[in-house]
């Protein structure tokens, strides 16, 4: 019995050797199945994983050491963008020190901001108005454009006028700080001075007098300085 098993074992061994000899090594490796999680960094050759082997969009920020990355060429000019958050319309962030103000700068028309006078500033015209004086002018304060036209008030308030008598008017530039004004009578039908008496900031009594020193109801202009 023992003698009969020996030839059988030898025969099986010989068959296995013959099969292996007839099978290319590559094919045998191709059929090799590795256990899950059995390959680690020690088994992977250095520089063996190339771009074609990496799945697109599979690497995240946690997989990249940012300090090893070079500067992106197109971002070089962003170094001096002190306020690049607002530089939405800046062609070059290099000069965008504060691009948020670029819109306002464009509205200056190329004139330096220092060339503009501040509202109600000393030396500026603080207000003006044309008053259509007449015998029918209201004796209570009015802002009617038919009576009070072309108004400007740096104090942003209304300009109110009333008639107290022949050639005698009271004018209020509400919110205006000026206590200095000039008046000019309409050239027709009368010519003469317009006298102003300040009652308070932006508030004046006005006397319209012709060259014969007679009070007259006619149109006149006031300007506040």
Image (spheres, rainbow, N blue to C red):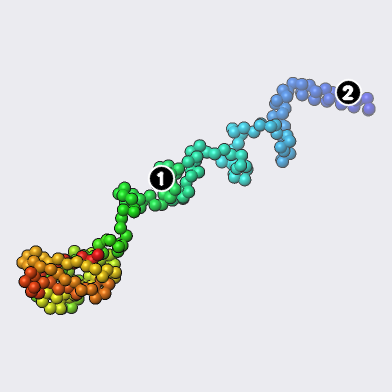
Q: Residue 66: x percent and y percent? A: 60, 42
- Relative to the observer, which residue lies in front, 107 or 16? 107
Q: What's the distance in space between the residues labelled 2 and 1, CA to CA?
A: 91 Å
What residue is at 29 percent from the left and 69 percent from the top?
177
Mark 2 or 1, nearer chain start? 2
Q: Is residue 61 left or right of residue 86?
A: right
Q: Nearer the viewer, mark 2 or mark 1?
A: 1
Using the rendered image of the protein, determine whether residue 158 is visible from the camera's viewpoint.
Answer: no
Please determine whether, in this image, residue 70 is positioned above or below residue 174: above
What residue is at 43 percent from the left and 44 percent from the top?
95
Q: Residue furthest right?
A: 2
Q: Is residue 11 left or right of residue 54?
A: right
Q: Residue 151: x percent and y percent? A: 21, 65
- Relative to the observer, which residue lies in front, 195 or 3? 195
What residue is at 30 percent from the left and 62 percent from the top?
122
> What secondary structure is found at the residue carrying circle 1?
loop
> What secondary structure is found at the residue carrying circle 2?
helix
Please determine whether, in this image, residue 220 is positioned above or below residue 11: below
Q: Residue 205: x percent and y percent? A: 19, 75
User: Any mark on residue 51, and which?
Assistant: none
* Disc 1 target residue: 90
Q: Residue 57: x percent and y percent? A: 56, 41
- Relative to the observer, which residue lies in front, 191 or 66? 191
Q: How many residues crowd mark 1 within 10 Å: few (<14), some (14–19), many (20+)? A: some
Q: How many residues crowd mark 2 within 10 Å: few (<14), some (14–19), many (20+)? A: few
Q: Is residue 98 left or right of residue 11?
A: left
User: Any mark on residue 7, and which?
Assistant: 2
Using the rendered image of the protein, determine whether residue 3 is visible from the camera's viewpoint.
Answer: yes
User: Where's the C terminus, which quadrant?
Assistant: bottom left
User: Where's the N terminus, which quadrant?
Assistant: top right
- Which image quadrant is residue 138 in? bottom left
What residue is at 70 percent from the left and 26 percent from the top?
27
């Amino acid at each position: 019995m023992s003698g009969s098993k020996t030839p059988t074992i030898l025969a099986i061994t010989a068959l296995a050797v013959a099969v292996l000899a007839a099978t290319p090594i590559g094919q045998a490796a191709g059929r090799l199945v590795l256990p899950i999680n059995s390959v680690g960094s020690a088994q992977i050759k250095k520089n063996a994983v190339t771009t074609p082997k990496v799945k697109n969009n599979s690497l995240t920020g946690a997989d990249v050491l940012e300090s090893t990355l070079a500067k992106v060429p197109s971002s070089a000019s962003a170094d001096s963008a002190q306020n690049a958050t607002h530089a939405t319309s800046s062609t070059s962030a290099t000069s965008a020190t504060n691009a948020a103000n670029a819109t306002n700068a464009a509205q200056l028309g190329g004139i330096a901001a220092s060339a503009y006078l501040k509202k109600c500033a000393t030396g500026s015209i603080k207000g003006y108005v044309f008053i259509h004086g007449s015998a029918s002018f209201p004796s209570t304060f009015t802002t009617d454009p038919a009576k009070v036209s072309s108004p400007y008030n740096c104090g942003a308030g209304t300009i109110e006028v009333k008639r107290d008598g022949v050639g005698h008017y009271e004018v209020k530039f509400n919110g205006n700080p000026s206590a200095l004004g000039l008046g000019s009578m309409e050239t027709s039908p009368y010519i003469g001075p317009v006298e102003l008496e300040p009652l308070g900031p932006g508030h004046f009594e006005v006397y319209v007098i012709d060259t014969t020193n007679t009070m007259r109801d006619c149109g006149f202009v006031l300007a506040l300085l």
